[in-house]
Amino acid sequence: MGTWGSGNFESDTARDYVSSFIDRLVAEVAEAMDGDPVEIEADEYWGVAVPCQLELLTVLTRAGHTSDTLLRPELVEKWKKHFIAVWERTIDDLEPSQDYKEERRAVLVRTFDQLAEAAAAHAE
């Protein structure tokens, strides 16, 4: 086991932990995106959890934490198109205000875009 600093993530054990955490986040998002679209509707568990997971992945990637799972910007873009299409097809059923709808859509798009940017920067 190697330790190269006093920080929380500066050892092989910590690196293994954060790597497995990232792998789990990516696997859960991939499973949600490949699953029944009903599960990612705005009022469903994965419809709420996936954007949270994407934001966590962005923070971790920007901080330089990685895993063996290479997160490609093209995959994030594919996820965005699918997620936003489901969201747009179903959000009106919840009768949100127009302001909320516009603001929430912008946040969702930004969340996917920021992860794609972080993934691209990491790939360089």
Image (cartoon, grey):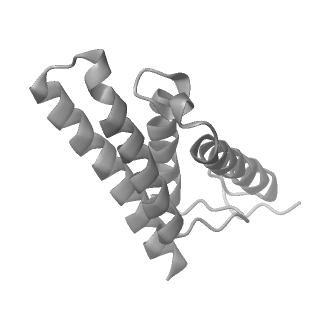
Quadrant hosting residue 96: top left
Relative placement, left or right, of 103 versus 114 is left
Q: Residue at position x 40%, y 27% from top? A: 42
Q: Is residue 32 above or below residue 124?
A: above
User: Residue 74 location, x and y as percent?
Assistant: 48, 70
Relative placement, left or right, of 2 versus 107 is right
Front one among 109 and 63: 109
Q: Quadrant of the N terminus?
A: bottom right
| Residue found at the very far left of the displayed protein | 99
User: Residue 67 location, x and y as percent?
Assistant: 69, 61
Front one among 120 and 35: 35
Q: Residue at position x 59%, y 45% from top? A: 29
User: Residue 10 location, x and y as percent?
Assistant: 68, 57
Relative placement, left or right, of 33 versus 31 is left
Front one among 54 and 63: 54
| Residue found at the very far top of the displayed protein | 95
User: Residue 41 location, x and y as percent?
Assistant: 45, 30
Q: Is residue 10 above or below residue 52?
A: below
Quadrant hosting residue 89: top left
Q: Residue at position x 30%, y 17% from top? A: 94
Q: Residue at position x 55%, y 69% from top? A: 72
| Residue found at the very far bottom of the displayed protein | 124
Number of numbered markers: 0
Q: Is residue 117 above or below residue 21?
A: below
Front one among 85 and 105: 85
